[in-house]
Amino acid sequence: MIFGPDARGYVEIGRVISSVWSGTIYADTPMTRYIMRIGGPGWGMNYFSGVLYWAVGPNMLVGQAVSSFFGAATVPTIYWCAKNVFGNQRVSRYSTICIAFFPSMIVWSTQFLKDGFILFFLVLTMMMVLEIQKKLSAISVTLLVVSLLAIFSLRFYVFYMVAAAVFGSIVIGLGTTTSSILRRVLVVLIVSGAFMYLGLVQTATTDFDRFASIERFENSR
């Protein structure tokens, strides 16, 4: 665990959450309340670990296998994005090779770390934005909302940059016809409404006020 000591921590967190759901651990303790909070850095990874280990038991190899799956799934999505952006097969192949053999990606994917998941959902977000610009579908919008939700739950400060890029790309778009403009506006309204309905806008504001302070930056520095 030299390169990723957090992986062992997620196993313990998953064990605690799964035990709470199974009724073997009392939920109303300071530790369990902190672990099972919705907000702050990485709360989505806590619940993902809980669901995974509630289903199969606290086995680190299971988490590593799931992480490896998402890491492997990132490779073809990178190829698809590069092919659609540049329209060049050589660029697509080089992009695929670079992400497949990127040292940090190998470390993230072979251990149960959230960084590999974040990268996958970042690429999936780009993939869905490109797809929506060509054709609006319920599947594309749903996957876009799920991807943004996953990024927000795993690393909330990355979510702000990604959301700005997504909304900017959708609003500007590639088409100038009335139907394409209405389609892009509809997507923005659906995604914004979904996040407001889930209460994530308020959670994001709370997290920003908590962590984006001079004192917090000074402590980190």
Image (cartoon, rainbow, N blue to C red):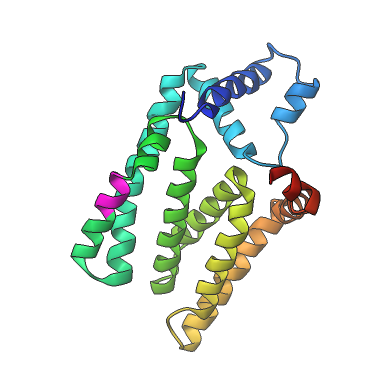
Q: Main secondary structure of the magenta part?
A: helix
Q: Horizontally, is 11 left or right of 207 in the view? A: left
Residue in view at x 64 percent, y 16 percent: 19
Q: Is residue 86 one of those drawn in magenta?
A: no
Residue in view at x 33 percent, y 55 percent: 78
Of all residues shown, which one is farthest toward the left? 90
Task: Tell me where residue 130 sits by quadrant.
Answer: bottom left
Q: Where is residue 93 in the image (x, y as percent from the top left)?
A: 21, 57
Q: Horizontally, is 100 left or right of 181 in the view? A: left
Total numbered labels = 0
The correct choice, above or below, for 17 with respect to 205 in the image is: above
Q: Is residue 99 one of those drawn in magenta?
A: yes
Q: Position of residue 186 (x, y in %)?
A: 57, 73
The correct choice, above or below, for 75 with respect to 166 in the image is: above
The correct choice, above or below, for 26 with respect to 89 in the image is: above
Give, as a single range, the part of the protein colored magenta: 96-101
Residue in view at x 36 percent, y 34 percent: 68
Q: Where is residue 107 in the image (x, y as percent from the top left)?
A: 39, 35
Of all residues shown, which one is farthest toward the bottom? 177
Which of the pair 173/2 is nearer the observer? 2
Q: Horizontally, is 100 left or right of 150 in the view? A: left
Task: Tell me where residue 92 sits by quadrant.
Answer: bottom left
Of all residues shown, which one is farthest toward the top? 24
Q: Position of residue 96 (x, y in %)?
A: 27, 53
Which of the pair 133/15 is nearer the observer? 15
